[in-house]
Image (cartoon, grey):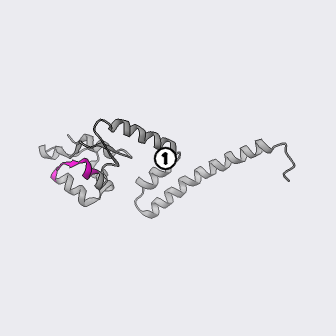
Amino acid sequence: MANGLELSLMCDLRVMEQSAVLSFFNHRYGLPVIDDGTARLPARIGLSRSLDLILTGREVRAEEAYIIGMANRVVPPRDDMNDALELEKKCALNVPNRDSVYSAVFDSDSFQQAMQDETMHTSKIISNEMHRGFQWFNKTFKDDNTAS
């Protein structure tokens, strides 16, 4: 009962099959939302939409889920796993600094905090890359005094 929806809200990106339906169905049966769905959903789709879905338990089809931000991609039936794996591969290749992205986007209470988080994490990476660059330079040009 609704744990699939709540589990999806824990994910950074969500791929949804066209025929899938999301809902807090547990409210229809008097069961509480217990997996942080009430905390995570407003961050994804805003407070007003979250209240609508949580209080009514109404169904959200894939197209609406995409439009309001509950899904990042909508794919044809039976393609969801392949598309999700393809998306994961792209993310793995393009985001070497996932920690800074995650902190800046999700852990920040304000725009200013997001900027501070991004700067803090980026400076660590720049520092590490500079160190590697110096090591490479020293190793490559160690015995070459013609550059001076």
Work out which quarter of the rendered image holds the N terminus and state it. Answer: top left
Picture coordinates of residue 64, whole percent (x, y): 25, 52
- Element on which disc 1 rests: helix
- Quadrant housing residue 109: bottom left
Amino acid on which the number 1 mark rests in the picture? Arg
Residue 3 forms part of the magenta stretch:
no
Write the start and end of the magenta stretch as one range: 56-65
Is residue 111 toward the left or the right of residue 52 in the image? right
Q: Say few, some or many: other residues with alpha carbon within 10 Å of mark 1 (under 14 / 14 to 19 / 20 or more).
A: few
| Pointer 1 residue | 98
Residue 59 forms part of the magenta stretch:
yes
The residue sitting at the left extreme is: 29
Nearer to me, 125 or 147: 147
Is residue 140 toward the left or the right of residue 77 in the image? right
Q: Image point 27% across, 48% down: which residue? A: 37
Q: Image point 31% across, 51% down: which residue? A: 40
Nearer to me, 70 or 64: 64
Picture coordinates of residue 103, whole percent (x, y): 45, 52
The residue sitting at the bottom extreme is: 112
Picture coordinates of residue 98, whole percent (x, y): 49, 47
